[in-house]
Image (tube, rainbow, N blue to C red):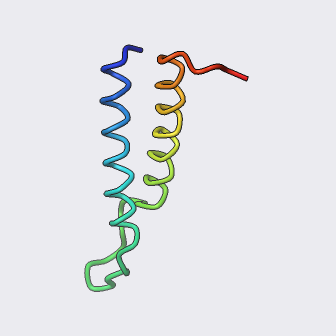
Amino acid sequence: MSLTATLVLLVASLALAVFAGWRGALPPDPRRGVRIVPWRFVMLVSGAVVFFAVIHLGALFGAPVR
């Protein structure tokens, strides 16, 4: 994957993680019904993608692998 694609994926997944963290932290509203999107799980998955994108970015810049 190229540097540009990695940076786009990193920024997009970081923005999604922040948004999902904000939505997951909101208190439940019983008048609106059940939450359809599991925001905490979305935050966890996008955080994992951020982690792997940072590792891949380091590999692109030549960080040593141990």
Q: Residue 35 location in percent, x, y?
A: 36, 69
Question: In screen coordinates, is 20 left or right of 52?
Answer: left
Residue 4's place in the image compared with 11, above or below, is: above
Residue 24's place in the image compared with 45, above or below, is: below
State the image quarter where residue 28 is shown. Answer: bottom left
Residue furthest toward the right? 66
Which residue is rendered at x = 34% and y = 66% of the image? 22
Residue 48's place in the image compared with 6, above or below, is: below
Question: In screen coordinates, is 31 left or right of 38?
Answer: left
State the image quarter where residue 33 is shown. Answer: bottom left
Q: Quadrant of the C terminus?
A: top right
Q: Between residue 2 and residue 21, name the one nearer to us.
A: 2
Question: In screen coordinates, is 37 left or right of 48?
Answer: left
Which residue is rendered at x = 37% and y = 35% of the image? 10
Q: Residue 41 location in percent, x, y?
A: 49, 56
Q: Between residue 57 and residue 47, name the one nearer to us.
A: 57
Which residue is rendered at x = 53% and y = 33% of the image? 52
Q: Residue 23 location in percent, x, y?
A: 33, 66
Question: In screen coordinates, is 8 left or right of 25?
Answer: left
Q: Quadrant of the N terminus?
A: top left
Q: Residue 7 location in percent, x, y?
A: 34, 28
Which residue is rendered at x = 44% and y = 45% of the image? 46
